[in-house]
Amino acid sequence: MNIRLEQPQDYREVENLTREAFWNVYRPGCTEHYVLNQYRNNPDFIPELDFVMEEDGRIIGHVMFSKASLTPDPSPKERGDLIVSPAGGGLEGALTSWTFGPISIHPDYKRKGYGLKLLKYALEKAREQGVGFLCMEGNIDFYRHAGFDLASKLGIHYHAEPRDAEVPYFLAQELIPGWLRSKGITEATYCPPKGYFVADENPEAFEAYEATFPKKEKLHLPGQLV
């Protein structure tokens, strides 16, 4: 097993891997491969934290990281010393947090420990580069093994849910202990980076991109979000 930075010559193979990994999981078909395709030109994309995993010379896994942001409580107007941009923004003086995903493991290698190995490696590299805090959406039964817990326990709220809700899929972790306190954050609201919604915002461009891949059957399955 080898984990390394993604290279331009890997792009198409990684996008196909991502398509295979997410097909019919959260919706009929998937959009994660298009998100990845578009994100490489997004200013929030972090190329230094864009990793592939190889087994026997074959790329079987991938994970990418992105800048994100928090809106603290009380509001930025009341806390003029701490102005936080909306997700995907780049306002001067903005406090940046981070997220990651999609994280993809080829279906042939799922449930064999590869995903956790890739994630733990990537999280350590992120910590070394000063990434202090991560929010993400996922299954706590898997991600707790990499140190994640419900974001609500850290006072972080999800933008699309009631503020007092304990959202079971919204997770967070301080990679650098005490990072939130060091930034004066006791409560905040998180919104996913704008680039994650590119397929929904540009459906015609997405369909044209999807047409460049071999056809696969889209299925409506129990447990899908859409």
Image: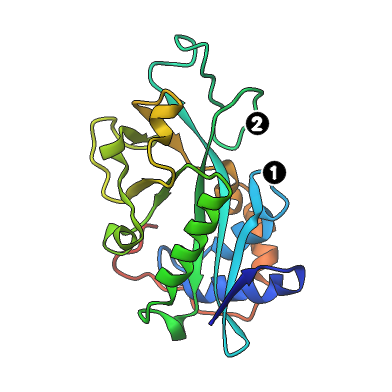
The vertical placement of 74 against 23, above or below, is above
Give the colouring mode of the picture. rainbow
**Is disc 1 placed on a helix, strand or loop?**
loop
The quarter holding residue 32 reads: bottom right
Which residue type carries mark 1? Answer: Pro
Provide residue 70's location: percent of width, then percent of height.
Answer: 47, 31
Q: CA distance from mark 1 to mark 2?
A: 9 Å
As drawn, is 149 to the left or to the right of 6? left
Q: Residue at x 62, y 32 (%)?
A: 89
Q: Residue at x 34, y 26 (%)?
A: 186
Q: Nearer the viewer, residue 16 or 186?
A: 186
As drawn, is 219 to the left or to the right of 45? left
Quadrant placement of the C terminus: bottom left
Provide residue 224's location: percent of width, then percent of height.
Answer: 35, 63
Q: Which residue is mark 2?
A: 90
Any part of residue 118 in sight: yes
**Is disc 2 placed on a helix, strand or loop?**
loop
Q: Nearer the viewer, residue 196 or 82?
A: 82
Q: Residue at x 48, y 42 (%)?
A: 132
Which residue type carries mark 2? Answer: Gly
The vertical placement of 77 against 9, above or below, is above
Q: Earlier in the sequence, mark 1 or mark 2?
A: 1
The vertical placement of 37 against 10, above or below, is above
The label number, if any, that marks residue 43 in the structure image: 1
Do the residues under discs 1 and 2 have CB atoms within 8 angstroms? yes
As drawn, is 169 to the left or to the right of 5? left
Are there few (<14), some (14-19), or many (20+) residues within 10 Å of tag 1? Answer: few
Q: Nearer the viewer, residue 168 or 204?
A: 168
Provide residue 150's location: percent of width, then percent of height.
Answer: 28, 46
The label number, if any, that marks residue 179 in the structure image: none
